[in-house]
Amino acid sequence: MAQAQTLSRNQQIVLDIIEKSKGPLKAYSILFNVQKKGINAPQQIYRALDKLIEMGKIHKIESKNAFVACRSSDCEISKATAFSICESCEMVDEISDAKLSKYLSSFNHRKGMKFKRFNLEFFGLCKKCK
Amino acid sequence: MAQAQTLSRNQQIVLDIIEKSKGPLKAYSILFNVQKKGINAPQQIYRALDKLIEMGKIHKIESKNAFVACRSSDCEISKATAFSICESCEMVDEISDAKLSKYLSSFNHRKGMKFKRFNLEFFGLCKKCK
DNA sequence: TAACATCTGTTATAATATAACATTTTAACC
DNA sequence: GGTTAAAATGTTATATTATAACAGATGTTA
């Protein structure tokens, strides 16, 4: 899992599209965008997405079932992710805040569970939409 | 929206099932469980779920597309939710930690966005599964 | 080249969620 | 009580998101 760098053809195609996009992309919207490149089936997209997530190249925005490229180098292969989401324009911005990340990474639930990973999603209105 | 207390028939049926459940429930699993009570269609479930979420009676676990009853009085009608999720047994526990909630509620993104709401999901192995 | 893992292509289907419309119930007000 | 408006219901159909299962191709690595 999580190889250093080599991406397969389909993985590269999918990553390119996500990286070029200004906002989060949904799986089927990616699919429609790559049909000209010979990718025809959802499976092919979902497989690439799964691997890209494992590698930490992209993240899934759970509340939107959509995917964004990772812009942060310190999210530790998706173990500690935080996003700011505009409820009006749907913009998503990855938050990389060392203090926040440290605070949450060291947070321990009193019921004795040790956390390996977290995902935080903030919602509001972005500057433009306010 | 978000009336004080009165639940409609369907809302009450759905809430009852979720409250009785030990773990998170999925919409279609709720549906199968209430067909004996005359609820036959997904719409009826999703409508009840939407209202119950508005009222703060239940929460959606975004990473699982599942629903849990709210056990916390200080989640401020779902404006500030945090959960602990076991990756093995799928147990979900609502975290109500005043410090955490305060810290996150007052967190401000440097890019000028003011947050109205957040959802935090921690993943790990629960006591039993460790 | 043998062996093994990974990636690919494909068809089919499962699981999650919403649209749209007709009707009924409830709540609020006169 | 009668009127009205809002909320909830029932129903059919469909959209959206995601996985199963299988066969073949490609790519490491010994």
Image (tube, coloured by chain):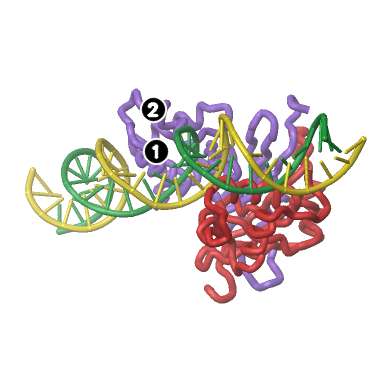
Chain colours: A red, B purple, C green, D yellow
User: Disc 1: which chain?
Assistant: B
Find residue A109 and report its image quarter. top right
Q: Picture coordinates of residue D8 (x, y %)?
A: 31, 42
* Residue at image location 41% in from the left, 28% down from the top: B32
Locate residue A87 relative to residue A1 in the image: left or right.
left
Residue type (three-letter) at the residue carrying disc 2: Val
Residue type (three-letter) at the residue carrying disc 1: Ile
Question: For this rendering, which residue is in front, B20 or B44?
Answer: B44
User: Disc 2: which chain?
Assistant: B
* Residue at image location 61% in from the left, 54% down from the top: A61
Question: For this rendering, which residue is in front, D1 or A2?
Answer: A2
Residue tagged by mark 1?
B45
Locate residue C12 relative to residue A65 in the image: left or right.
left
Q: Picture coordinates of residue A130 (x, y %)?
A: 53, 74
**Mark 1 crowd level (few <14, some 14–19, many ≥20, 10 Å Cα):** many
Work out which quarter of the rendered image holds the N terminus of chain A and state it.
top right
* Residue at image location 59% in from the left, 51% down from the top: A45
Q: Is residue A100 above or below residue B17?
A: below
Q: CA distance from mark 1 to mark 2?
A: 9 Å
Q: Picture coordinates of residue B23 (x, y %)?
A: 58, 30
